[in-house]
Amino acid sequence: MRTPFLAGNWKMNLDRRTALDLVGALREHLGGRTEVEVAVFPPFVYLDEIARALAGSPIKVGAQNCCDEAEGAFTGEISISQLADVGASLVVLGHSERRHIYGETDELVNRKVQRALAAGLEVILCVGETLAEREAGRTEEVVRTQLHGGLAGITAVDMARVTIAYEPVWAIGTGVVASPAQAGEVHSYVRGLLAGLFTAEAADSVRIQYGGSVKPSNVKELMAVGDVDGALVGGASLKPDDFLPIIDFAR
Ligand code: PEP
């Protein structure tokens, strides 16, 4: 039984006040509910304060990135132990904006995944194809390469702390959402790849989130797909009016 996992990736949005108001509303709304798992990914500078605001609630706090090195002369970078120190318990890695804007390779993503898991954090590993790749019939090849590359050297035991987010790049921030059939096809392909890389049991336990223009109006039909176990939400995670109905998709 995979607990649905709804996560809000705030990207480089919100200020201190709106961020605190947002998590205050989330905390009050969610109370002690455990039938869904919820996480927020604030910008680095607000992590400490947001983690303190959510202390004692079931809502997890994560980082949007981390450095692949442990410590030292890496100006502008943030280490995984610094993230853990301020209360982050998970990290999003391999997001398409990191891959496409900042040129992150599968090798770099994999070093970050290894670093995060070794430090005891959870990871959301993002994979997904561009529109050109989909139109060229390369979706499975791209997803397979990113998944194999990102998870190199990871054990079946480690996979208990890994969530995969399938985020077609053409659906991120565009308002164009994958159809339930399109999402379902790739999600079941990903689960099959995980079974090949690890064990059938490990693959069956891993949650696979869909990400890309998830909104209150489309979350229910996406979550109805067998292999869709949650959502990684960008724009619609920034306001309680959007994110709370997403969390409540089953109500
Ligand atoms: C994302 O950035 O992970 C994302 C899915 O964004 P949006 O929901 O805005 O498409």
Image (tube, rainbow, N blue to C red):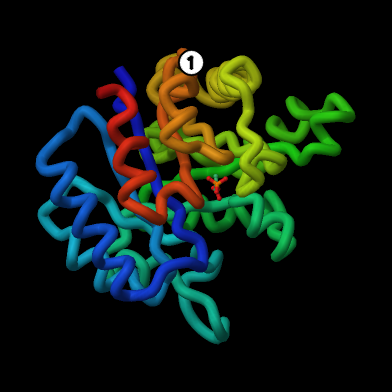
Q: Position of residue 160 (x, y in %)?
A: 37, 34
Decide which of 39, 151 is in the foreground and name it: 39
Decide which of 123, 135 is in the foreground and name it: 135
Q: Identify the residue at horizontal 56%, vertical 40% (top origin).
A: 213
Kind of residue sitting beneath label 1: Val
Q: In this orientation, does residue 31 appear?
A: yes
Please tell me in which quadrant of the rendered image residue 187 appears: top right
If the image is split into quadrants, where does the N terminus sit? Answer: top left
Q: Identify the residue at horizontal 80%, vertical 30% (top origin).
A: 134
Q: In this orientation, does residue 117 appear?
A: no
Going by the picture, which residue comes out furthest to the right?
136
Q: Position of residue 97 (x, y in %)?
A: 65, 56
Residue 217 versus residue 69 in the image, above or below: above
If the image is split into quadrants, where does the C terminus sit? Answer: top left
How many numbered discs, if any?
A: 1
Please tell me in which quadrant of the rendered image residue 229 appears: top left
Q: Is residue 12 left or right of residue 46?
A: right
Q: Identify the residue at horizontal 31%, vertical 56% (top origin).
A: 61
Residue assigned mark 1: 225
Q: Position of residue 87 (x, y in %)?
A: 26, 64
